Amino acid sequence: MIVLNYPSYPFKIKPIAGKDQLFDPFRKIWIALTPEEWVRQNVLQYLVQVAKYPAALIAMEKEIKLGALVKRFDIVVYNHDIPWMIIECKEANVKINEKTMHQILQYQQVLSAKYLIVTNGHETFGAKIESGKLHALQNIPDYL
């Protein structure tokens, strides 16, 4: 398991139409503050502030096609326009299990990233893909 110590960040939150909205500094829009979004925003701050990943190379909530299905990945980090890492975020009360791993592996079929990370904010698991095999990570890899 990977341990993520989230940095502090002054998130902007306000009620809009009776529901809490969070300002996403990456997409520069107000979005619904859901439990999953809270995890995603903290992971993004970890990547940029702690791991020093370039914010300009991080994509969120983009559509991909899996056969006839259209899905949306949570986070993809790119390296020279090539997907380098896929991160799947779940809300805190969702267990990381085989179903979660199956979901990120579906995204991997389309994106072919080198690293896969799954987190619910409390538990984080990762793997590096080498020669078609998954190798467990102990840390978030340094950005190239």
Image (cartoon, grey):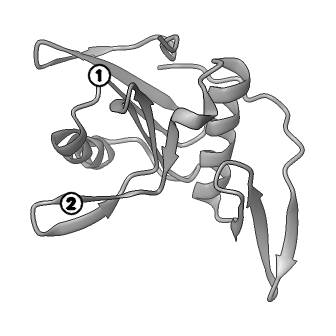
Q: First in sequence: mark 2 or mark 1?
A: 2
Q: Position of residue 76 (x, y in %)?
A: 43, 39
Is 100 in front, or is 29? 29
In the rendered image, the residue lying farthest to the bottom is 17
Q: Position of residue 65 (x, y in %)?
A: 21, 60
Q: Position of residue 44 (x, y in %)?
A: 63, 38
Residue under the image location 71 percent in, 23 percent down:
5
Q: Is residue 114 left or right of residue 137?
A: left
Residue under the image location 79 percent in, 73 percent down:
20
**As drawn, 67 above or below 88:** below
Q: Marks 2 and 1: CB-CB under 8 Å? A: no
For disc 1, the neighbor class at 10 Å (few under 14, some 14 to 19, many from 20) is some
Q: Secondary structure at mark 2?
A: strand
Q: Is residue 92 left or right of residue 65?
A: right
Number of marks:
2
Q: Is residue 56 left or right of residue 68?
A: right
Q: Which residue is mark 1?
A: 114
Amino acid under label 1?
Lys
Q: Which mark is residue 65?
A: 2
Residue under the image location 77 percent in, 62 percent down:
22
